[in-house]
Amino acid sequence: MKVLRLHAPGDLRLHDEPDPEPGPGEVVLRVTGVGLCGSDRHWVAEGAIGDAGLARPLVLGHEFAATIESGPRGGERVAVDPAIPCGVCPTCARGLEHLCPQVEFAGHSLDGALRERMAWPDRLAHTLPDSISDAEAPLLEPLGVALHALDLGHAGPGTRAAVVGCGPVGLLIVEALLAAGAAQVVASDPLPRRLEAALARGAVAEGSGVDVAFEVAGEDGAVAAAIELVRPGGRLVLVGIPDGDRTTIPAAAARRRGLTILVSRRMKATDLPRAIELVSSGRVELGGLVTERRPLVEAHDAFDSLLERRGLKVVVEP
């Protein structure tokens, strides 16, 4: 089977490797779509993300959908949770499996989905309804990330919110906020096409004094801009991942407002089923977010689009 591995920053190579053999509790998945995201961008550009560095040739890809090829669920279309927590540590026991210190994660500590087939735990493969297409299904994982960020920010009916950084996750936060009954969503992004996409989804370009702001760019300027939008006593949720593993916060502005600052990491196990329900019910629309689809053999072109931020969501279809 074809497998794409990252050997060093900018060094992506296509390999022929044996088909996977499932272990206990695992199924073989035929990967149908992989969304490329900001974390993949960090891996390719820097050979690292946060404090994790590239230790071996790694298969990227954690936003993915597939068809089950083995076992009693053979032929079933699924969206896949990329995180495998240990389930037994004190953090998992507190219901914080997404923060498990021993978590294994596709495209990070484990090989991810940029390959034709992979073995993965059956319990992490969630059934897809026919109403969600293979092209849209990889967006369910970032929608789960958006839902987790909303939970941290206590965003619900009547909330006035801001989203600073309108890439795919930021746009999904906009949609999730409006689906949750937010009274207003202020959107900001320096790229006109991203801001236009946010406005087309119901956001507005101007506003202030919001209850909660979501910073989704991973840049200090975006953090400062988000703080300026929040009312005294409000909340700031940091979702973006910065280059170089450093975020700088203008302390005086945050202190004067008495802000609560929260840091969002990935999603909880319950968020992917929530995302599937939101899309299948029509409350969140994924159409239009996928602006480029490429086969695995054209993955270099797909990553060029990602690195240059040429569109919204790039999907590779192995």
Image (cartoon, helix red, strand yellow):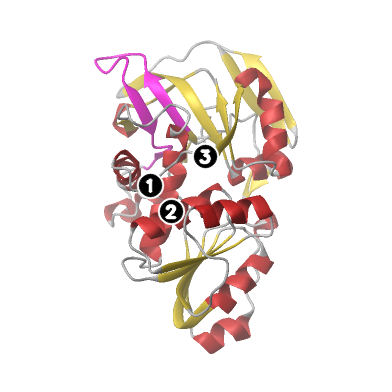
Instruction: Check contact, mark 2 vs mark 3: CB within 8 A.
Output: no
Q: Which amino acid does label 1 sit on?
A: Val
Indicate the secondary structure of the residue bearing disc 2: helix
Is the C-beta separation of discs 1 and 3 under 8 Å?
no
Rendered position, 305 above or below 223: above
The residue carrying mark 3 is 288
Does the residue at mark 2 contact the one at mark 1 (Cβ under 8 Å)?
Answer: yes
Asked whether residue 265 is in view, the answer is no
Q: Which mark is residue 284?
A: 1
Q: Quadrant of the C terminus?
A: top right
The x and y percentages for residue 280 are: 31, 38
The residue under the point 72% across, 44% down is 46
Amino acid type of the residue that numbered disc 2 sits on in the rendered structure: Glu
**Residue for point 29% across, 31% down:** 123
Secondary structure state at the residue bearing disc 1: loop
Residue 53, x across and y down, in percent = 65, 44
Which residues are drawn in magenta?
A: 64-85
